[in-house]
Amino acid sequence: MTDDQRELMPAVAEMPTRYGTMHLHVFTDHQGKEHVAAVSGDVSGRSEVLCRIHSECLTSEIMGSLRCDCRQQLETALARIGREDGVVIYLRQEGRGIGLANKIRAYALQNQGIDTVDANRLLGLPDDLRCYKLAGRILQDLGVKSVRLLTNNPSKINGLNDAGIPIASHEPLLCDVDGLAQGYLEVKRDRMGHLIPGAWKPDQTQAKKAQ
Ligand SMILES: [Zn+2]
């Protein structure tokens, strides 16, 4: 068995969740990090599978941080695949890949009024170290033929294309966020090229849901 094959041999189990019954596939990479694919329904051999690629964010998902919208995005994506079938891939690349300690150092700078991109640069770190190659390999392992990608991030679209996964379509994932995360979303839109509509506000999303 080659290292590549060993790396991709997942542990799999069915699991009841608040979003419905899913199969959890856990993949261990060559660094020993464990990445997860939550799969709802049968996606093997299917095209146009609803897919979200999510990067770990301990501060919002576990600690309840209001600095970003990651937890809301994850929960919204899990609820969507619970209803419509699909895959949520959870990659262990905290802080856009710079790691938790560096992310917290960047937060300390942001507390002084520096935005998220400039904070990383002051620390000598790239804006975004995330890599989506592994997500492509996970989707191949799951037998997914093409995806409908839930994302606001053009680099995820490019990353999956580079990994050989056809993207049938993509649609934005907009969530209701606390006011504190608004500045963070504006930086994502204005400095990182994320596809967040300029006029979008959380309350409009809420109004749409109510209609
Ligand atoms: Zn976050």
Image (cartoon, rainbow, N blue to C red):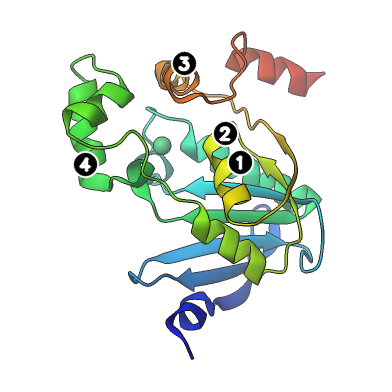
Which label is found at residue 102? Answer: 4
Numbered-mark total: 4
Query: Where on the picture, by quarter, is residue 89?
Result: bottom right
Q: Nearer the viewer, residue 157 or 115?
A: 157
Which label is found at residue 154? Answer: 2
Marks 1 and 2 in Cβ contact (< 8 Å): yes
Vertical order, 9 against 86 (above or below): below
Tell which quarter ligand 1 is in. Answer: top left
Q: Residues within 10 Å of mark 3 (few under 14, many from 20)?
A: few
Q: Nearer the viewer, residue 91 or 69?
A: 91
Residue that sits furthest to the top in the current view: 199
Which label is found at residue 190? Answer: 3
Decide if residue 47 is on the left or right side of residue 82. Answer: right
Q: Is mark 3 within 8 Å of ligand 1?
A: no
Decide if residue 35 is on the left or right side of residue 113. Answer: right
Residue at the image position 50 percent from the left and 60 percent from the top: 134
Q: Is residue 35 visible?
A: yes
Q: Nearer the viewer, mark 3 or mark 4?
A: 3
Query: Where on the picture, by quarter, is residue 16?
Result: bottom right
Secondary structure, mark 4, is helix
Marks 4 and 2 in Cβ contact (< 8 Å): no
Earlier residue among tags 1 and 3: 1
Give the CA separation, mark 3 to mark 4. 23 Å
Vertical order, 115 against 123 (above or below): above
Marks 2 and 3 in Cβ contact (< 8 Å): no
Give the CA separation, mark 1 to mark 3. 18 Å
Q: Nearer the viewer, residue 108 or 203?
A: 108
**The disc labelled 1 sits on which kind of residue?**
Ile
Vertical order, 93 against 67 (above or below): below
**The disc labelled 3 sits on which kind of residue?**
Asp
Which label is found at residue 157? Answer: 1
